[in-house]
Image (cartoon, rainbow, N blue to C red):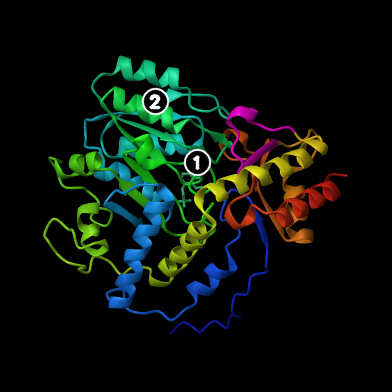
């Protein structure tokens, strides 16, 4: 018999989260999550799921029937797109301008497909001319995959142009919107996006652990025409839809697939309800406005942005660490003295840049003011 450990309840401090995510969670969302757990097949819960689907459709600006939240973080949303749509031996053009484009490449290879990588420099947007050259050189490619908002660098790519190129060359588009959803303009139907995934913990300011996903009718047709079953049972959307909307291939109505993360889904419902109340366009504008205030302050402190102004994400501000400044010491002091988290550099920018997030509930004046004051104190 192991002796029962005596451990106090975990009681985290209230931090201000201004890193690459998770972002500050709306108080209303935290409150929603602590409401009583009910059964995931309870008629009241099922009614909430119907509303949630409509709210995800609004946030993505889509009428896609196959729209839901995967019960796992953004990485599972990414994997959902690749394992459902891409079959072994198929060719996928993958744009890589940071960490998450590289993860897409790994997903492609793990399903046994062929990745044709289009590289752009870290800190740059995906270059549509390079993509078009790859599409021309590989007429047998079936997909174009890219990251809309590259969280590792703060670069925003032109999803509208890239998806139009995908269509022109008969490819389905797979788009990572983990950091873009709710923070910058994103129009799934208008831009012709075929498969898209996001995360709950960035500009939605929800608790981490859920991934909104949507497939266009063309993506659904591709899924239904598969020659082999989806190798992941859990992520197989033809089965999951049986729970989400009763449209499983076997005709099952709201049947059990897996135990839904009931309370986390209350939280997502609340965060998307808040987004809908604010209005998408107002939320995009708020992120842009707060970015301008932060930018002025950071430049006033002599900090330089990694990404050119034209493709800079308002919600993820990557700035170079000034020469001679100890990266870890600064972030530790911000955390310990100001309860403020900013992000370290990732991949090629590790030790070279900080990533300051202005996401969702965090994109507000108090956060900008705190961050600028704290950085000024610590750097001087
Ligand atoms: N894609 C992008 C662009 C991300 O920023 C992240 C996480 O930061 C992911 C995918 C993976 O999401 P998660 O950490 O929720 O699994």
| Quadrant where the N terminus is found in the figure | bottom left
What residue would you read off at disc 1? 185
Give me the residue at 65% from left, 31% from top: 306
Figure quadrant of residue 332: bottom right
Give the CA distance from mark 1 to mark 2.
26 Å
Neighbours of disc 1 within 10 Å: few (<14), some (14-19), many (20+): some
Label 1 CB sits under 8 Å from any ligand 1 atom: no
Query: In the image, is residue 206 part of the stretch drawn in magenta?
Result: no
Q: Which is more toward the observer, 307 or 369?
A: 369
Using residue 236 as the reference point, say whether residue 179 is left or right of it.
right
Q: Which is more toward the observer, 253 or 80?
A: 253
- Measured as percent of width and height from the top left, residue 219 is found at 25, 41
Using residue 36 as the reference point, say whether residue 303 is left or right of it.
right
Indicate the secondary structure of the residue bearing disc 2.
strand
Q: Report whether residue 11 is seen.
A: yes
What number of labels is visible? 2
Give me the residue at 59% from left, 79% from top: 9
Using the image, tell me which numbered label, if any, was put on residue 128. none
Q: Which is more toward the observer, 152 or 55?
A: 55
The magenta-colored residue range is: 304-319
């Amino acid at each position: 018999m192991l002796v029962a450990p005596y451990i106090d309840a975990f009681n985290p401090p209230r931090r201000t989260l201004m890193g690459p995510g998770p972002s500050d969670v709306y108080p209303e969302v935290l409150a929603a999550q602590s409401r009583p757990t009910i059964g995931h097949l309870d008629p009241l819960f099922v009614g909430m799921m119907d509303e949630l689907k409509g709210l995800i459709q609004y946030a993505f600006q889509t009428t896609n029937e196959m729209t839901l939240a995967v019960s796992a973080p953004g990485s599972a949303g990414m994997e959902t797109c690749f394992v459902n749509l891409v079959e072994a031996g198929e060719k996928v053009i993958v744009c890589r301008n940071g960490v998450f484009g590289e993860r897409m490449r790994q997903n492609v290879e793990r399903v046994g497909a062929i990745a044709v990588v289009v590289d752009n420099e870290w800190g740059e947007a995906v270059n549509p001319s390079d993509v078009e050259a790859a599409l021309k050189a590989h007429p047998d490619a079936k997909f174009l995959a890219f990251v809309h908002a590259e969280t590792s660098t703060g670069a925003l790519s032109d999803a509208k142009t890239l998806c139009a190129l995908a269509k022109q060359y008969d490819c389905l588009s797979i788009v990572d919107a983990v950091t873009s959803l709710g923070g910058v303009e994103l129009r799934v139907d208008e831009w012709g996006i075929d498969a898209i995934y996001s995360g709950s913990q960035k500009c939605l300011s929800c608790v981490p652990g859920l991934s909104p996903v949507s497939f266009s009718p063309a993506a659904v047709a591709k899924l239904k025409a598969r020659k082999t079953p989806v190798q992941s049972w859990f992520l197989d959307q033809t089965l999951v839809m049986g729970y989400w909307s009763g449209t499983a291939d076997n005709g099952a109505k709201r049947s059990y697939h897996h135990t839904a993360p009931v309370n986390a889904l209350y939280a997502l419902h609340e965060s998307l309800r808040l987004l809908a109340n604010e209005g998408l366009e107002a939320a995009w504008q708020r992120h842009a406005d707060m970015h301008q205030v932060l930018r002025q302050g950071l430049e006033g402190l002599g900090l330089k942005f990694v990404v050119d102004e034209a493709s800079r994400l308002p919600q993820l501000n990557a700035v170079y660490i000034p020469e001679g400044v100890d990266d870890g010491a600064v972030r530790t002091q911000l955390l310990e003295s100001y309860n403020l988290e900013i992000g370290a550099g990732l991949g090629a920018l590790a030790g070279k840049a900080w990533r300051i997030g202005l996401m969702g509930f965090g994109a507000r004046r108090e956060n900008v003011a705190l961050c600028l004051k704290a950085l000024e104190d610590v750097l001087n």
